[in-house]
Amino acid sequence: MRMIEVAQRKPTLAGARLDGENGQALVEYALILGLVSVVAIALLGAVGTDIGSLLQAVTSALNSAL
């Protein structure tokens, strides 16, 4: 009886390995997304003041044109 239980559990263990690989891919995508987010935040922080002054100049030019 014990051998039958082991034989029945073995396919589920193989299926668990496949699910683990899917989980690994999910973690890899999450790490990539985190890295892209950090880079985007750093770039916006570096050029954020330049963009702010550019938008202020455009706003001033549009207000004076009206």
Image (cartoon, rainbow, N blue to C red):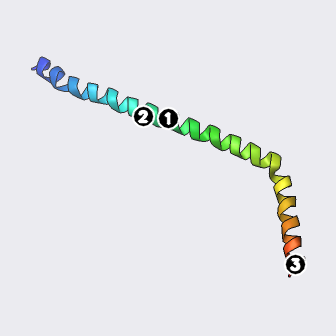
Q: Which element is circle 3 on?
A: helix
Q: Which of labels 1 and 3 is toward the front?
A: 3
Disc 2 vs disc 1: Cβ atoms closer than 8 Å? yes
Q: Is residue 37 left or right of residue 13?
A: right
Going from the N terminus, do you reach mark 1 or mark 3 first?
1
The image's mark for residue 23 is 2
When asked about the image quadrant of residue 18, the answer is: top left
22 or 11, which is in the foreground? Answer: 22
Cα separation, mark 1 vs mark 3, equals 52 Å
Q: Which element is circle 2 on?
A: helix
64 or 13, which is in the foreground? Answer: 64
Tag 1: residue type?
Val
Circle 2 residues within 10 Å: few <14, some 14–19, many ≥20: few
Q: Is residue 50 left or right of residue 7?
A: right
Circle 1 residues within 10 Å: few <14, some 14–19, many ≥20: few
User: Residue 39: where, in percent of width, then height?
Assistant: 70, 40
**Residue in the image at 58% along x and 41% along y:** 33
Circle 3 residues within 10 Å: few <14, some 14–19, many ≥20: few
Tag 3: residue type?
Ala
39 in relation to 62, above or below: above
**Residue in the image at 13% along x and 17% along y:** 3
35 in relation to 17, above or below: below
* Residue that numbered label 1 is attached to: 27
Disc 1 vs disc 3: Cβ atoms closer than 8 Å? no
The image's mark for residue 65 is 3
Going from the N terminus, do you reach mark 2 or mark 3 first?
2
Cα separation, mark 2 vs mark 1, equals 6 Å
Cα separation, mark 2 vs mark 3, equals 57 Å
Q: Which element is circle 1 on?
A: helix
Tag 2: residue type?
Gly
Residue at the left extreme? 1
Numbered disc total: 3
